[in-house]
Image (tube, rainbow, N blue to C red):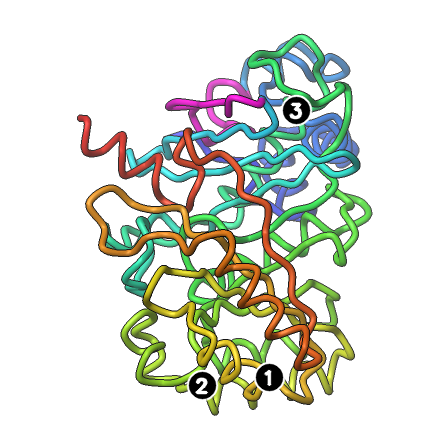
Amino acid sequence: MKQSLLEFDRAELEQFLAGLGQPTYRAAQVWEWIYRRHALDFAAMTNLPKELRTRLDEIATVAPLRLATEMVSQDRDTLKVLFALPDGQTIEAVLMLYDERRTLCISSQAGCAMGCTFCATAQGGLARNLTAGEIVAQVLYFAHYLAEPALPPATTAQRPTTVTNIVLMGMGEPLHNYKNVWAALRRLTDPDAFGLGARHITLSTVGLVPMIDRMADEGLQINLAVSLHAPNDTLRTHLVPINKGYPISELLASVRRYVEKTHRRVTFEYALMRGINDSAALAQELAHALQGILCHVNLIPLNPIPDSAYQPTSDADTERFAQILRDAGIPATVRLRRGIEINAGCGQLRRAVVRAA
């Protein structure tokens, strides 16, 4: 298997190239091609000697992900990609195009071990963690796509342009793959690497309390989003089984500690499911639980899974739920629904491809 250069930091890349008899400055050239020019192969690295490009192509790669399938939404503002990993596992990433933002939703694991009962990814369990390089590779793939106007498929993006925001809300629980996720985040925010501002990145977690505390000490101003989905332990444990280990009282205490240390507002994500967690009484209970926390609630219309008992709440009931929160002083918005017809919800495209195979 070829060595992915995306697994190396700058010093490790220098060592690798030194082993090929190359001077130190070659690492700077390759680094720039990867992280600034978003090259996906060595042939594009035209300031490298031809012999070196040939040798690198034989033993290494800067594109460890293979495009398995891609789908574009009917309004052409959402592009979903299924990537194949070198070992045959697959992961998803989604590019969402807004008026001023090009937001990329990426995966942190192949599958997921958290077992959320309404999530397509959870149904297949966890295959493995992604490496730091595989996480970074998703971003570089779309950075390359956005920079090249002629690359298919056509979308509403006026290219060339750039990735402006990243959300770790794809497959997997990012804090369950802490070491590799944070190595990737350091690379993505490093001004000498990809260079995206930390405040343009959001990490979403189901609530691994020790890791939230650890995240608060990282000193990187990543946005934290917590997938809550219920205001009490009985309902949340049914929807999010990890709640057995980290009940809501402990989770909210960790969020309060996080806010106190970082002075950053936290987003609570709440996927509304008809007849399950969308009643007025539950909205009032949620508002009470979140009082005093510097937070915002993002209400998510559920992307339904075929044959699932969980179905999305009506628009009217969604707005009613949001208004109850607002009336109680809790800022709340409803997430814009994207890519329903292309299985844009987490794990849905992968599940559809696996079932069709």
Residue 67 painted magenta: yes
Q: Earlier in the sequence, mark 2 or mark 3?
A: 3
Identify the magenta region. Answer: 56-75
Tell me the number on the disc at residue 290.
1
User: Residue 1 location in percent, x, y?
Assistant: 36, 31
Kindly state the secondary structure of the residue where label 1 is placed.
loop
- The residue at which mark 3 appears reads as 144
Identity of the residue drawn at 59% across and 62% down: 298
- The kind of residue on which mark 1 rests is Leu
Q: Is residue 22 toward the left or the right of residue 300 in the image? A: right
Q: CA distance from mark 1 to mark 3?
A: 41 Å
Kindly state the secondary structure of the residue where label 2 is placed.
helix
Q: Nearer the viewer, residue 218 or 325?
A: 325
Q: Is residue 162 toward the left or the right of residue 121 in the image? A: right
User: Residue 115 location in percent, x, y?
Assistant: 28, 64
Residue 354 painted magenta: no
Q: CA distance from mark 1 to mark 2?
A: 11 Å
- The kind of residue on which mark 2 rests is Ile
